[in-house]
Image (cartoon, rainbow, N blue to C red):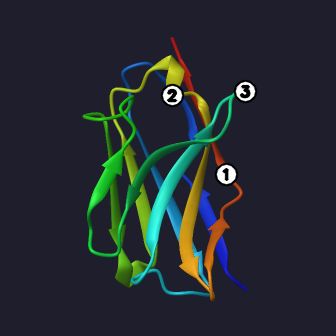
Amino acid sequence: QVQLVESGGGLVQAGGSLRLSCVVSGRGISRSAMGWYRQAPGKQRELVADITSGGSTNYADSVKGRFTISRDNAKNTVYLQMNTLKAEDTAVYYCRLLAYVGSEYSYWGQGTQVTVSS
């Protein structure tokens, strides 16, 4: 029932920008922490940014000052604004909803590819 759908990925040159969107259906997001993760070829999935239900944000050191996570609870959507993109940002980006169903549980999107050319 719960589904997360990412969009906005694509091919961009180094120094360019993209905005990723994650639309959640089947569950409201207002009371949940949300996050963006990425996985590059040959590497483990890593946290990019997350945002609490209260709006507090956290970023990986590698993206601080360049990426911004935000949420629009009315639209049940989370965004990741990515500026000054670098080749090392190339990865599949995944959206995550952190829920509690008796215990901690995560819902994940299918991912969207971001490719930054140099």
The mark nearer the N terminus, 2 or 1, is: 2
Find numbered disc 2 in the image and state the secondary structure of the residue it sits on: helix
Binning the other alpha carbons within 10 Å of mark 1 as few (below 14), some (14 to 19) or many (20 upward) gives: many
Q: Is residue 64 left or right of residue 112?
A: left
* Residue 15, percent from left and from top: 36, 21
Q: Quadrant of residue 39?
A: top right
Q: Are marks 2 and 1 in contact (CB under 8 Å)?
A: no
Residue type pointed to by label 3: Pro
* Residue 106, percent from left and from top: 63, 69
Q: Which residue is mark 3?
A: 41
Q: Which residue is mark 1?
A: 111
- The span from disc 2 to disc 3 (Cα, nearest Å) is 11 Å
Residue type pointed to by label 2: Asp
Binning the other alpha carbons within 10 Å of mark 3 as few (below 14), some (14 to 19) or many (20 upward) gives: few
Q: Residue at x 34, y 75 (%)?
A: 53
Q: Is residue 84 left or right of residue 105?
A: left
The mark nearer the N terminus, 3 or 1, is: 3
Does residue 35 sit above or below 54 in this rendering? Answer: above
Closer to the camera, 27 or 51? Answer: 51
Q: Which residue is mark 2?
A: 89
Work out which quarter of the rendered image holds the N terminus and state it.
bottom right
Residue type pointed to by label 1: Gly
| Labelled disc at residue 91 | none
